[in-house]
Image (cartoon, rainbow, N blue to C red):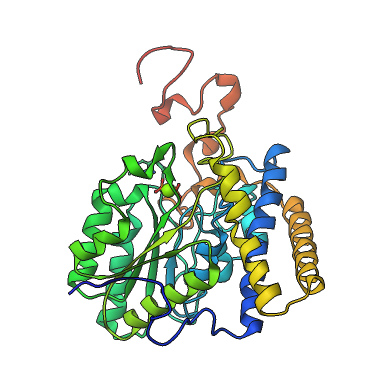
Amino acid sequence: MAARRRRGPETAGGHLGEALPLEQKLVLYYWMRMTRTLEERLVALYRQTKVVGGLFRSLGQEADAVGSCFALESRDVMSPLIRNMGAMLVKGATPLEILKQYMAKGDSPTRGRELNIHFGDIGPAGSTRGFLGQISPLGDMVPVMAGVTMTFKMRGEDRVGLVYVGDGATSTGAFHEGINFAAVQRLPLVVIIENNGYAYSTPTAKQTAAKQFVDKAIGYGVYGEQCDGNDVLAVYDCTKRAVDRARAGEGVSLLELMTYRRKGHAEHDNQSYVPDGEIEQWAAENDPIDRFVRVLRDREGVSAETLAEIDARIVREIDAATDEAERSGVPDPLDALVGVYADPPAERPLWFREGADVSSLGKERPEGWGTWDASKGGTR
Ligand SMILES: Cc1ncc(C[n+]2csc(CCOP(=O)(O)OP(=O)(O)O)c2C)c(N)n1
Ligand SMILES: [Mg+2]
């Protein structure tokens, strides 16, 4: 029987986030601030054309990524999306890897093949950090994570999976098939819907006729909970509860984190479709870092100096990582062939073997290779 609850004082076992020791709360602060500052650095590098692909921000969503991933153990596996850099950092991805990745460096995790945070580190428990390389088709990571958590169940491993999807991704067939399969199999999977108000330019009201995404939990027969995604302790609280349920064999949970995407889909998007004043209001009244700073200062007695020290340490760490990433070279063109068909390649590629001067022939590859020749202007 599905249950749906909102976070409240009646929650069994108390508020797990509020019960975290201060030391852990400061770690949450560190990761939220790191996420924001690292993204700001990436924007600066983007404007200098050193970040060469798209740049996707999670401004205003840091609590949702950081607070949820913080509820996982190191042996658990998480599947992030473009706005979950904070979750990847919590799971062990380093600012240096992320900078090199965005700058397409030859020694980045994907060796310059991909210009975003689509990289992973998965394997047996204890041997890797436990995050998947995301794929772009929306919703597809749900069936992938159903498969991952099915292996945990079949092998009797004490491991939980967490998959993030946006509000837009819930409209795909893959989301439905994945969560339904995981629900039926009672897999140890937490599905987080990050309701940030928009999918590209489509507002949530045009994404679903449901009043709220958490209502979908009832249809799948799984536990559902909605929480304030800009309150990092509330996010930790509800995710930890879902993770504990999964670990105890109680199956899938569907969580809806209420947040807001303050930047466009990516840096190129001018957000002309957003009503006047909406972004400013969220920034002024519901910034997750500002809110948590108030909690730390007013409720936990943390001084402004302590927080300023953490902020300064983060800037030093990002400065050092930026310098190191800038020193790295671009990928060797031949490396594009490694890990594609055979690794290492059985033979040197044909056009190099023939010694063809590609540019003087005015075509991408030698004729024998069968690709289009611009100078002949016709058949392929
Ligand atoms: C199946 C599919 N359709 C369309 C796209 C193009 N696309 C990429 S991101 C995006 C919007 C995603 O919105 P949402 O799921 O709400 O995530 P958010 O960007 O808000 O974090 C779209 C339409 C895609 N990647 N996959
Ligand atoms: Mg969205």
Residue 340 visible to the viewer: yes
Residue 323 located left or right of residue 68: right
Identify the residue shown where x is 68% and y is 60%: 96
Q: Is residue 239 above or below residue 216?
A: below
Q: At which x and y percent is residue 329?
A: 71, 49
Residue in front for this viewpoint, 263 or 370: 263
Residue in front for this viewpoint, 180 or 23: 23
Q: Is residue 133 above or below residue 159?
A: above
Residue in front for this viewpoint, 127 or 92: 92
Identify the residue shown where x is 36% and y is 21%: 380
Can you tell which quarter of the image residue 360 is in? top right
| Image quadrant containing the N terminus | bottom left
Residue 107 visible to the viewer: no
Residue in front for this viewpoint, 177 or 282: 282
Residue 121 located left or right of residue 307: left
Q: At which x and y percent is residue 94?
A: 63, 65
- Could you tell me how many numbered marks the image carries? 0
Residue 249 located left or right of residue 202: left
Q: Is residue 50 above or below residue 22?
A: above
Identify the residue shown where x is 67% and y is 63%: 33
Q: At which x and y percent is residue 15?
A: 47, 81
Q: At which x and y percent is residue 373?
A: 45, 19
Identify the residue shown where x is 56% and y is 43%: 279
Q: Is residue 192 above or below residue 271?
A: below
